[in-house]
Image (cartoon, rainbow, N blue to C red):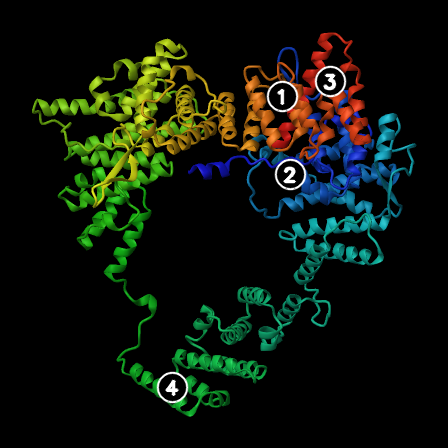
C-alpha cells in the first residue's frame, strides 16, 4: 500500500462540533435528566440504546471477596436502572414495533418481565390461568403486552433475515444459545399466549398502561400498585377497539404462520385480519394502533387466495388477485393478450407466469401465457424465452392459431408504428423457420396478417426457403433418433473425466481418473486447468519425469496441494502431499526431498495459522528440529558435492526461497534466539540472506535492553537495513561527452530487495522483534528527515547510530513508507501496545495529520488506563506527548480542548491556555468543556473573557464551574488532587468518544 493510500485508510476523525454523548450513569445522578433528554428532537443516545445500557448495567454480575461471580445484586442502583429502562419504554408508549427493531430478544424479554413485576402480576401463576377482567387495568395490559410480544417474536423468527456483519452479541455463542432457548420457551407457550389474547377480545372496557408518571409513583411508594389504587385508571388510556384491533392483527399473524401445517389456521387468520380491517375503518386517527397496513393488505389477499374466498368481480382486488381468482374458477381470460401484454407490469407478469407454470392441470393457460409473453417480447425487441422455443418443437394447430390471433390483436394497438410492424415481420419469419411441420408453416404464410405485412417478393423467398428445407428433411432415410438415444462420443467421456479431475481432492481417485484418461488419449493432462500452478523452481524436475502418467500425477498432486494451502485446507494438503511423497520416493531422491521441504512448509504455515486464530500452543520439538535441518541443508549439500558423493543432497536440488524465509520467521516468532545466535553455522549465515537477517535480529533482541552490550550487533543490523533502503544512481553519457543522471535504481549492495524485506517482516509476530525493527526505522526516519523538533519516538532508540555516512544514497521515500507499513502491521497484531500507538501517533503528527494523531494518542492512554477509569501513567502521557496533543487540538481549531489539556502538564501552561481561550472561532463544544477545568486561574480568566465579550450565559456557566466546593483553594491538597483526577478522567473519556 502506498503512503497516500495508507494515510487515507487511517482513522479520519472529523472535527468535533457536538458535545459528548450523555453517559448512562448521569441519569442516576439527576432524576430530571431522563425526561429532559427524551423530550429532545434528536436525543443521543436514542431511547432504545438507553434501554440497552440501563438493563446491561443492571444485569452485570458482581464478584465477591473470594473472587466468585455472583448474580446481579438486588440493590437500589439496579432497581433504579430497571425503572429507568421502563420509563424509556413508557415514553415510547410501549410500541412493540420500535422496541423489536432496536432491542434483541433477551433484552426485550428482560424489559417485559420487569413490566410484569412492577405491574404486580402474580408470580408463579400461568397467564392463561389469570382472569383479566378481575385484574387492575395496568396489570391486565402488562399481561397482554407480554403475550403479544411472545407470538410476534415467534412470527418474526420464522421470516428469513438478511445476514449482517456479526456484531459483538452475534459472535457470542452464549448469546445465540440464549436466544434459541428463549424462542423454544415462547413456542412451547404459544398456545397459552393465544388463549390469553383471545380472552382479551372479550373485554369491552378501556385499558390503561404505565406512563412516566405512574412509574414515578411506584418508585416513590413501592406499596402502591398500578398508580394510586388497585382499581386506578391512572396511566395512558387505550380504548377497547384500539386494543382489539392490535390483538386481532397479531393473532392473524400467528395463525397465518401456523397455516403451513394446519390449513384451518388460514381460515382463522382471515377472520382476524377481517376484524382488523373493520376496526381500522372506525378510527379517524389511530394514536395507539401500530401495524403495517401494507403487510396487513398482503396478509388479507394471501388468506383470501389460500381459502378460496376471492371474488373475480371484486373491484378492490389487485391484478395478481384477479389472476389468481380467474385461475381457480378455470376462467382462461387470464391469457388474453390485453391482460398480459398491456395492462400487466413486467414484474407482475413474470410472477404470474411462474405461478401458472407450477400449477397443476393448467397446461392450456401456461401455453397461452407463453405465447402472449413471446409476442410482447418480440414487439419490445427482447430475446424470446426458452419456454417459447420449447413450445415450437411440437406445437398443435390451435396453439399456432392462437399465436396468430395474439399477433393480430397486439398490432392493432400500434397500427401507426412502423417499428412495431418491422418487429412483427421478424417474429413471423422466426416462427416459420422454427416450425418443423409444413402444414403449420402453411397456416402462418396463408394468414391475413402475414400477407399484409410481408411484400410479395419477401413472401416468395421465405416460402422457397421453407420448401427447400422440407425437401432436405424428406431426404433423410430414417427418422432422427431422440437426443437421449445418441451414444456419447469419446470426447464427451474425456471431458467428463477432466471435469472430475479438476474437482477431485482424493489422491486415489485422481490416479484412477488419470489412468482412464491415458487409456483414451495420450496428451499432457497436467495442462487441463490453467489454475494448476507449480513453483518455477520445480517445473524442470517434474517435467523431466519420463513416464507421462507419473508426470501428470506428480504435477497435479503438488498443484492441488499448494492450492489447498492458500485456502487453508491443510487436511487435504497433507493427504495430497503424502501421496505424492510416497509416489516420488520410488524413483527420485531429488523429488522426495522437494516434497519433504514442501511438507515442512505446510506444517509451519498450519501452525502459524493456528496461532493467528488464537492458539498459544508451542510447536512440537520435532517441527523445530525439522526447521533447523532445513536451514542447514545447503551446507550438507555443498559438503556432499565437495567430496564427490552421489547423495540425495545433490547440489542442483531445487530449493524455494520462501521455505527458508518462513523457517527463519518461524524461529524468530518462537524465540529460538539461542540457535540463531550461537548454533547456526557461519557458512549458512553468509550464504542465506534471511538467516543472516534472522541472526542479527535475534542477537540484537537477546542483548536488549542494555545499550552498551547491544551496540555492536545493533550496528551490524543497522548497516544491513541501510543498504536495503539505499539506491544507486545510473548515469548516461550524452553525445557531447557530458554525463547526465537518468534514474535511480534500488541498490544491489543490499542482501535483499526492499519488497522482499517488507514481505519477510510481515511474517513476524514476536513483539520484541517488531519493537526492535520499529525502533530502527524510527531512528532511520528521523535522520533522513533531519527535523529535530518533530521527531518520532520509540523504544530503544539509544542503541542505533545517530548519523549516516552517505545520506544521498538513501531512498527517503522508501524509508517513510516502510516505517508506516511496519507500525500499521504491528498494530494489526496487537492494537493495545501503547508504545506502538504512540509511535503511530507521532508519525501522523510529523506528517500534519492531526486528527489521526490525536486518535492514536488517546488510544494509547485508553489501553493503559482501562479506558481512562484509572490515571494514565506519566511515562505514557509525557509532557512531549501532551504538548503534541495540545498542538493537534489547536490545529483543529478546538481551542477549549487546548485550554483543558494545558492543565495536564507538570507546569500549567497559562500562556497557551489564555491564548486559546481568546480565540472566538472554535470548532469544539466550548462551554460544555468548562466542567472539566479544575484550575481556578483558568476559570477566572474565562469569567473575565465572557464578561468582556458580553456573553452572559457562558459567563454564568464559568461562574458555576468555579463555584464548586471541591475546587475551593482552602481544601486539603488530597481533595484538590482528587477533583483534578476526576475531571481528567471524564475529559479524556469525552475526547475518546469524539475521536474514536
Name the residue rendered at 69%, 26% in the picture: 57
Q: Kindly indicate the quadrant of the structure image that contains residue 364.
A: bottom right
**First of labels 3, 2 by sequence position:** 2
Residue at mark 1 to residue at mark 3: CA–CA distance: 25 Å
Q: Are marks 1 and 3 in contact (CB under 8 Å)?
A: no
- Taking the view exactly as shown, the residue that stands out farthest to the front is 736
Q: Kindly tell me whether residue 59 is visible in this rendering.
A: no
Element type at mark 4: helix
- Taking the view exactly as shown, the residue that stands out farthest to the top is 972
Say which of marks 4 and 1 sits in front: 1
Element type at mark 2: helix
Q: Which residue is mark 1?
A: 868
485 sits left or right of 169 in the view: left
Q: Are marks 2 and 4 in contact (CB under 8 Å)?
A: no
Residue at mark 2 to residue at mark 1: CA–CA distance: 39 Å
74 sits left or right of 664 in the view: right
Say which of marks 2 and 1 sits in front: 1
Say which of marks 3 and 2 sits in front: 3
Q: Nearer the viewer, residue 885 or 103?
A: 885
Q: Nearer the viewer, residue 876 or 115?
A: 876
Residue at mark 4 to residue at mark 1: CA–CA distance: 88 Å
Q: Quadrant of the N terminus?
A: top left
| Marking on residue 462 | 4
Amino acid at each position: 500500500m502506498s503512503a497516500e493510500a495508507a494515510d487515507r485508510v487511517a482513522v479520519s476523525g472529523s472535527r468535533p462540533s457536538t458535545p459528548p454523548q450523555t453517559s448512562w450513569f448521569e441519569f442516576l445522578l439527576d432524576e430530571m435528566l431522563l425526561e429532559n433528554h427524551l423530550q429532545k428532537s434528536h436525543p443521543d443516545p436514542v431511547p432504545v440504546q438507553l434501554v440497552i445500557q440501563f438493563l446491561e448495567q443492571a444485569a452485570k454480575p458482581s464478584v465477591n471477596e473470594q473472587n466468585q461471580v455472583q448474580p446481579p445484586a438486588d440493590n437500589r442502583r439496579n432497581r433504579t436502572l430497571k425503572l429507568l429502562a421502563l420509563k424509556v419504554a413508557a415514553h415510547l408508549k410501549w410500541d412493540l414495533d420500535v422496541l423489536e427493531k432496536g432491542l434483541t430478544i433477551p433484552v426485550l424479554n428482560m424489559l417485559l418481565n420487569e413490566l410484569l413485576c412492577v405491574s404486580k402480576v402474580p408470580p408463579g401463576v400461568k397467564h392463561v390461568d389469570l382472569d383479566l377482567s378481575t385484574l387492575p387495568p395496568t396489570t391486565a395490559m402488562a399481561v397482554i403486552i407480554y403475550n403479544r410480544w411472545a407470538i410476534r417474536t415467534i412470527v418474526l423468527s420464522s421470516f428469513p433475515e438478511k445476514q449482517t456483519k456479526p456484531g459483538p452479541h452475534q459472535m457470542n455463542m452464549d448469546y445465540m444459545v440464549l436466544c434459541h432457548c428463549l424462542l423454544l420457551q415462547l413456542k412451547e407457550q404459544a398456545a397459552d399466549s393465544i388463549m390469553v389474547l383471545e380472552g382479551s377480545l372479550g373485554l369491552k372496557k378501556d385499558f390503561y398502561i404505565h406512563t412516566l408518571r405512574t412509574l414515578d409513583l411506584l418508585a416513590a411508594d413501592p406499596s402502591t400498585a398500578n398508580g394510586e389504587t388497585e382499581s386506578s385508571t391512572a396511566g395512558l388510556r387505550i380504548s377497547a377497539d384500539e386494543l382489539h384491533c392490535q390483538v386481532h392483527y397479531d393473532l392473524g399473524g400467528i395463525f397465518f404462520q401456523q397455516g403451513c401445517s394446519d390449513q384451518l389456521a388460514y381460515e382463522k387468520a382471515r377472520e382476524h385480519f377481517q376484524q382488523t380491517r373493520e376496526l381500522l375503518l372506525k378510527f379517524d386517527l389511530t394514536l395507539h394502533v401500530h401495524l403495517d397496513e401494507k403487510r396487513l393488505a398482503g396478509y388479507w389477499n394471501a388468506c383470501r387466495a389460500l381459502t378460496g374466498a376471492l371474488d373475480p368481480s371484486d373491484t378492490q382486488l389487485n391484478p395478481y388477485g384477479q389472476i389468481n381468482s380467474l385461475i381457480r374458477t378455470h376462467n382462461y381470460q387470464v391469457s388474453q393478450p390485453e391482460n398480459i401484454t398491456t395492462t400487466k407490469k413486467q414484474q407482475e407478469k413474470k410472477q404470474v407466469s411462474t405461478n401458472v407454470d407450477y400449477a397443476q392441470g393448467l397446461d392450456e393457460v401456461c401455453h397461452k401465457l407463453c405465447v402472449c409473453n413471446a409476442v410482447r417480447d418480440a414487439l419490445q425487441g427482447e430475446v424470446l424465452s426458452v419456454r417459447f422455443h420449447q413450445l415450437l418443437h411440437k406445437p398443435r394447430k390451435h396453439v399456432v392459431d392462437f399465436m396468430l390471433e395474439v399477433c393480430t390483436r397486439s398490432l392493432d394497438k400500434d397500427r401507426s408504428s412502423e417499428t412495431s410492424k418491422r418487429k412483427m415481420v421478424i417474429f413471423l419469419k422466426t416462427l416459420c423457420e422454427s416450425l418443423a411441420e409444413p402444414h403449420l408453416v402453411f397456416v402462418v404464410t396463408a394468414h391475413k396478417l402475414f400477407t399484409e405485412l410481408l411484400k410479395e417478393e419477401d413472401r416468395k423467398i421465405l416460402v422457397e426457403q421453407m420448401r427447400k428445407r422440407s425437401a432436405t428433411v424428406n431426404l433423410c432415410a430414417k427418422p432422427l433418433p431422440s437426443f437421449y438415444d445418441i451414444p456419447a462420443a469419446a470426447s464427451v467421456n474425456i471431458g467428463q473425466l477432466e471435469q472430475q479431475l479438476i474437482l477431485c481432492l482424493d489422491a486415489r481417485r485422481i490416479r484412477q481418473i488419470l489412468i482412464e484418461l491415458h487409456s483414451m488419449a495420450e496428451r499432457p493432462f497436467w495442462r487441463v486447468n490453467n489454475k494448476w500452478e507449480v513453483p518455477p523452481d520445480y517445473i524442470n524436475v517434474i517435467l523431466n519425469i519420463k513416464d507421462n502418467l507419473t508426470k501428470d500425477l506428480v504435477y497435479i498432486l503438488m498443484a492441488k496441494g499448494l492450492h489447498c494451502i492458500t485456502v487453508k485446507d491443510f487436511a487435504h494438503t497433507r493427504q495430497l502431499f503424502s501421496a505424492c511423497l510416497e509416489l516420488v520416493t520410488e524413483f527420485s531422491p531429488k523429488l522426495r526431498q522437494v516434497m519433504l521441504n514442501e511438507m515442512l512448509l505446510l506444517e509451519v504455515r498450519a501452525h502459524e495459522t493456528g496461532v493467528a486464530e488464537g492458539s498459544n500452543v508451542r510447536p512440537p520439538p520435532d517441527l523445530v528440529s525439522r526447521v533447523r535441518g532445513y536451514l542447514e541443508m545447503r551446507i550438507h549439500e555443498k559438503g556432499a558435492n565437495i567430496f564427490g558423493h552421489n547423495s540425495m543432497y545433490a547440489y542442483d536440488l531445487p530449493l524455494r526461497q520462501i521455505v527458508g524465509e518462513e523457517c527463519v520467521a518461524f524461529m524468530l516468532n518462537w524465540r529460538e534466539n539461542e540457535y540463531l545466535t550461537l548454533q547456526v553455522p557461519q557458512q549458512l549465515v553468509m550464504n542465506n540472506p534471511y538467516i543472516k537477517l534472522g541472526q542479527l535480529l535475534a542477537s540484537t533482541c537477546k542483548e536488549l535492553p542494555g545499550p552498551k552490550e547491544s551496540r555492536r550487533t545493533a550496528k551490524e543490523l543497522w548497516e544491513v537495513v541501510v543498504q536495503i533502503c539505499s539506491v544507486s544512481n545510473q548515469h548516461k553519457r550524452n553525445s557531447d561527452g557530458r554525463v547526465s543522471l537518468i534514474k535511480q535504481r534500488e541498490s544491489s549492495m543490499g542482501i535483499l530487495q526492499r519488497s522482499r524485506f517488507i514481505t519477510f517482516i510481515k511474517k513476524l509476530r514476536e513483539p520484541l522483534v517488531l519493537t526492535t525493527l520499529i525502533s530502527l526505522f524510527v531512528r532511520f526516519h528521523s535522520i533522513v528527515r533531519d527535523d529535530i523538533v518533530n521527531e518520532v519516538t520509540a523504544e530503544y532508540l539509544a542503541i542505533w547510530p545517530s548519523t549516516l555516512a552517505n545520506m544521498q544514497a538513501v531512498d527517503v521515500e522508501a524509508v517513510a513508507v516502510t516505517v508506516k507499513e511496519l507500525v500499521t502491521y504491528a498494530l494489526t497484531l496487537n492494537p493495545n501496545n501503547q508504545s506502538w500507538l504512540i509511535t503511530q501517533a507521532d508519525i501522523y503528527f510529523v506528517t500534519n495529520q492531526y486528527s489521526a494523531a490525536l486518535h492514536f494518542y488517546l488510544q494509547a492512554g485508553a489501553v493503559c488506563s482501562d479506558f481512562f477509569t484509572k490515571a494514565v501513567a506519566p511515562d505514557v502521557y509525557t509532557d512531549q506527548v501532551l504538548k503534541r496533543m495540545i498542538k493537534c487540538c489547536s490545529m483543529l481549531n478546538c481551542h477549549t480542548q487546548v485550554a483543558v489539556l494545558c492543565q495536564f502538564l507538570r507546569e500549567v501552561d497559562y500562556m497557551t491556555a489564555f491564548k486559546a481561550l481568546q480565540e472566538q472561532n472554535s470548532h469544539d463544544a466550548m462551554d460544555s468543556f468548562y466542567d472539566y477545568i479544575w484550575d481556578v486561574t483558568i476559570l477566572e480568566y474565562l469569567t473575565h473573557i465572557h464578561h468582556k465579550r458580553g456573553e452572559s450565559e457562558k459567563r454564568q456557566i464559568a461562574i458555576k464551574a468555579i463555584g464548586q466546593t471541591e475546587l475551593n483553594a482552602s481544601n486539603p491538597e488530597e481533595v484538590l488532587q482528587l477533583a483534578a483526577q476526576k475531571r481528567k478522567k471524564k475529559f479524556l473519556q469525552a475526547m475518546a468518544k469524539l475521536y474514536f
